[in-house]
Structure formats: structure tokens, C-alpha cells
Amino acid sequence: MSKRSRIFIGILLAYVVGVGWLMVRQLGDIDPRYRESAEESLVETAQLLAAFVEQASSDGALKTDGLQPVFQSAYARRFNANIFGFEKTRVELRLTVVDRAGIVVFDSTQRHLGEDHSKWNDIRLTLQGRYGARTTADTDNDPRTSVMFVAAPVRDRASGQIIGAVSVGKPVQSFGQFVEAARRKTMLVGATSVVAVLLLALIVSVWLVRPFGLIADYVAYVRAQRSFSLPRLGRRALGALGAAYDEMRDALAGRNYVADYVQTLTHEVKSPLSAIRGAAELLQEPMADADRARFAANISREAQRIQELVDRMMELTALESRRHLDAPAPVALRPLLAELVAGVQPAGAARGVRIELTPGADATVEGDAFLLHRAVANLVDNAIDFSPAGGVVTLALLPHRRTVDVCVRDRGPGIPDYAEGKVFEKFYSLARPQSQKKSTGLGLSFVGEIAELHHGRVTLGNAADGGALAVLSLPRTEDGSATAAATSPR
């Protein structure tokens, strides 16, 4: 994946992660807010019923006779209350009245009369004159759910002493449906926001880059079809959206990309230009013919270096602008490697380096034979440059079930630790062991772009027993056949 794609996808991922983090915080905050609201309502209800019991009680004795008929009537009532889309049809409120010892003297459900509730937090704290509340399992109906209780003290009207407590309970499931609804709506809003931003990005890309061309191309394609085929039109539409994404990505990331390119190129050209200017100034002074020839040779060499740098950059820029191969064809790799080895033998012989192709099975890939030839040739040229005199550069073809590896191995000093991870950066180059000179630093970037165009990858590291090992990994054709027709490099 290119740097521009990573930048654009990174922007979208940052937005998605941000929305996701916000949704998690919001979803986690919904339940506590509903519980707080329900508890506040229960506090007022408990105080109201405690005041009712106080008015009915006298001489320090609790009077709850009037409560049972009221709750029996309330539980028997059926109604239809539409609360924001949810139907409520019956009363679920529960009431427990205990004396000063915590013994239940009234229970609206008639299930806990005579029980000792003095150890429950809501009762215990309230009888001590403090605020008491608790949430426990709903043992009356469904233990998998819970009930929220809030208690209020009942005081003797004459002495003001606490003579009991009223505990009001409400099943959590009665407001849990509102919590789930709020969660669903929050998740829907988050998902809709992400989808809307993605669609907006596509629309903006079409508006900024190709206001009418994309739609016009698609309309022309639809008109050209003799028969209506929804799957075919859908694939074409997806292809058009993919083109819009590529153009939007380039529009968003292109400015930084170009700035980085110009800055790095300026740095690389600065050194040879300084050498040329210095030599030109010295040539204006009287000097011996031998010195004059030496400085003129320096100017020619540095000018050639700049020319090579510009040519390589133009090739790399043209390659990076391609999003896919124009006309991929089956390429048999072993004949391609054999032809390449034969072509680079003279260059290796001039350095005293032998180039060998190990025997083995063939493998076929879909791609551009010329670009693949250039990619492997760059790796071989690097291996020759870093090989000692009398060394051997080995090429090997290693087919796997879905991929095939083109391996280029030298016996040189290998890659220093500080250079690992940098060798594929543009303009980064290591000094050659023999000449101590550096290359343009664009060769491996060129190989990386070719690998990406072929949906493969390239790695460069140190071999286990010394030297450097470059591996160009490419996807094989679907049948993995090694007998497909070969396409010779130009």
C-alpha cells in the first residue's frame, strides 16, 4: 500500500476510532443516568408513603391497615400508557413497612411478612437515621433481574423518634427497556455518522476532482449496454467509486507527498551541484593541465549523477502514478530469470562476481514481464555492487501454494543494523564496499512500487550465514501452473 493510501485510510480510521471511543463512553453512561433518575423518583415516593404511614400511626405503633386494600386495587388495575413507544399496562411498585427492629409488618406482595430485614442496607441505614438504598436480585419473580429499593424513616409524631421504615422497590427491568432503546439509538447514530462521513468523502472527491466526468462515464457505459444486467452495472458502479476514492486520496495526500518529494530531491541534488560549482570556480584559475582535466572529469561525473537521479525519479514517479497494470499477462519466471542472468554476466565478470541461477521448478504469475525484469535486475545490480571480488550472486525461484519467491542472495557484508528498515526509503543508499560511493537511493523504492503493482511485496535482510538476501514475493496464477506461456521481457 502506498504512502498516500495509508495517509488517507489513516484519516478515516482516526475518525472511526474517535466515534467508536465516544460511543463506548456514551453507552457506558446511559445505564447509570437512568438508574439515577429512577432512584430520585423512588426517594420522593418513599417519603410520600412514609408520611402517609406516619399520619395513620399513633402512640409509637405502626398502623398499616389502610395500605393493603390500596395496593390490591392498584395491582388489579390495567391501563395502557404509551411512554415514548413503550406500553406500560400494570403497577410494578413494591412497598415494605418494617418496625424499629426491622421486622416486616406490611408487604404489598404478601411474601415477606414477619421476615427480619434489619440487615438490608436500605432498612439498616434508614433506621439509623441515614439515607438507605439497595439493589438486589428479584427473588419474587426472576432472579436474573434486580430490584432497586429506597427507604424512608417513619417517625412518631409526638416524640420524633424513628419507629419504623418504609422501603419502596421498583424492578430494574421496568426502566431497563428504556436503557436498551437508548443504547440502540446511540449505536444507530454512531453508525449513521460513520457511513455519512464516508459517503460525504466520496461525494466531495467527485465534486473536487471529477464533478461530472465520473457520472458521465457511468451513464455512457449504461447506455452502451445492449441488455440490462444489475450485477454488471453494480460492478461498474463499484469500479467508479473506487476511482473516486483513488482521486480523493491523491487530492488529500498529494500536497504533503509532493512537498516531501521536493524537499528530499533538493537535499540530494545539493551535494553534486556544490561539487560542480566548486570545480567550475577552480577551473577559472590558472592550473596544470592534469588538474584541469581532473576537475573537468569531476564536473562530468557529478552532472551524470544528477542526470541519473532525475531519470530515476521520473521513472519512479511514472510508476507511482499507476494504480494497476494496464495489460497483465502470464509470465513464466524461470525463463525470465535465465535471460536476466545471461544479460548481467558481463557486468558481474567485470567485478569478478559470478551470477548463478539455482535449478528448480518454474512458476507463473500474472503481471508485466518488463517491470518484473526491471525489478529483479535492480536487486541483482545491488547484489553485484555489494559482493566481494570472486563472490557469487545466487538467484533462486521458490514456488509456494499461493505465492512464489524470487530470491537474490549475495555474499557481501550484509545490511548494518542502523540501515534495517530504511533501505526502501527514497534516496537512502549505503556506500558500496569497493568504491565507497552511494547510488541514487531510488532502486529499491522502484522495486517496491513494482511489487505493489503486482500485489506482492519485497523484503531485504541479512542471510543467516552472511550476506544480504532480497526476496520478491508475488502471487501465483490461480491454478499455480508452471507451464503457462511465458512472456519475454522487452
Image (cartoon, grey):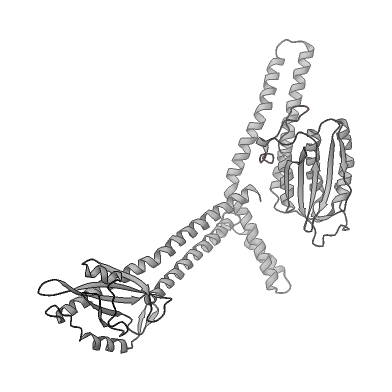
Which of these two is toward me, 426 or 463?
463
Residue 58's quadrant in the figure? bottom left
Is residue 287 left or right of 104 when viewed as pictured? right
Task: From this view, report whether residue 202 is shown above or below residue 269.
Answer: below
Which of these two is toward me, 356 or 81?
356
Residue found at x 40% / y 66%? 30
Which of these two is toward me, 334 or 218?
334
Which of these two is toward me, 84 or 55?
55
Residue found at x 76% / y 14%? 291
Residue 355 on image: x %, y %: 87, 39
In magenta stretch: residue 433: yes
Task: From this view, report whether residue 465 is shown above or below residue 405.
Answer: above
Residue 452 on image: x %, y %: 71, 50
Is residue 340 left or right of 279 when viewed as pictured? right
Residue 149's quadrant in the figure? bottom left
Task: From this view, report whether residue 480 is shown above or below residue 4.
Answer: below
> Which region shows up in magenta?
421-435
